[in-house]
Image (cartoon, rainbow, N blue to C red):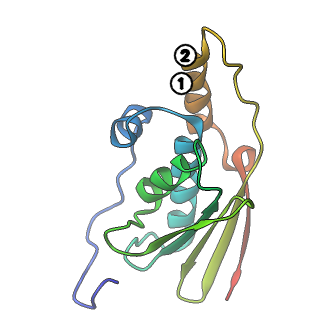
């Protein structure tokens, strides 16, 4: 938990696909989807990652687990600040709160590339497509008060 003396004085950094892959260790569409979800939540809940809290729900297996790294980089909610929680659940979604404001974000399905000789190249292309897509092409969001 962040103590009261902490202040946030920088504009949140926007990362490139390559920077996200460098942090995570490899490129993938779910990593990028998590980043986009985190950016959306940060922007729509005041832009201060010290006041934001994330709860990420997914089955704890790959590739779904990659979502959490993207959410951390996109929202600024981190394990080190203890303002992100990971819950093992088959219903994939991200919940963000800031004060009494709340957003629940559910990723939309997307077509995964076939596991053939072009799989790695196609994964990168899909990740870049997700990075450049509109929010409403990637997820649905429900806003509300707690």
Q: Answer with left or right where residue 91 lies relative to residue 120.
A: right
Q: Name the side, left or right, on which 46 lies relative to 130.
A: left
Image side of residue 3 versus residue 90, left or right:
left
Identify which residue, 82 or 99, lies in the foreground: 82
Other residues around mark 1 within 10 Å, as few (<14) / some (14–19) / many (≥20): some
The answer to which quarter of the image holds residue 47 is bottom left
Q: Residue at x 55, y 29 (%)?
A: 128
How crowded pointer 2 is (Cα within 10 Å; few <14, some 14-19, many 20+) is rated as few
Q: Residue furthest left?
A: 5
Q: Place residue 5 in its image quadrant.
A: bottom left
The residue that disc 2 covers is 121
For image coordinates 43% across by 58% down, the residue present is 72
Mark 2 falls on what kind of element?
helix
The foreground one among 42 and 72 is 72
Identify the residue at image location x=56%, y=65%: 41
The location of residue 53, given as percent across then percent down, is 49, 76
Q: Residue at x 56, y 37 (%)?
A: 131
Q: CA distance from mark 1 to mark 2?
A: 5 Å
Classify 70 as above or below 101.
Answer: above
Do the numbered discs 1 and 2 sit on residues whose CB atoms are within 8 Å?
yes
Residue 138 position, x and y percent, is 70, 46
Which residue of the protein is positioned furthest toward the top in this rendering?
117
Q: Which mark is residue 124?
A: 1
50 on left or right of 128: left
As drawn, 78 above or below 128: below
Quadrant housing the C terminus: bottom right
The quarter of the picture where the N terminus appears is bottom left
């Amino acid at each position: 938990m962040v103590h009261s003396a902490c202040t946030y004085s920088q504009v949140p950094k926007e990362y490139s696909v390559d920077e996200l892959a460098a942090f995570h260790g490899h490129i993938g569409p779910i990593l990028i989807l998590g980043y986009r979800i985190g950016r959306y939540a940060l922007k729509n809940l005041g832009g201060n990652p010290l006041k934001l809290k994330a709860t990420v729900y997914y089955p704890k297996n790959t590739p779904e687990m990659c979502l959490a790294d993207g959410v951390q980089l996109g929202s600024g909610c981190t394990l080190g600040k203890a303002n992100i929680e990971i819950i093992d659940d088959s219903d994939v979604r991200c919940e963000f709160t800031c004060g009494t404001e709340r957003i629940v974000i559910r990723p939309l399905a997307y077509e995964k590339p076939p596991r053939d000789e072009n799989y790695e190249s196609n994964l990168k292309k899909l990740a870049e497509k997700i990075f450049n897509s509109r929010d409403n092409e990637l997820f649905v969001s429900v806003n509300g008060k707690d």
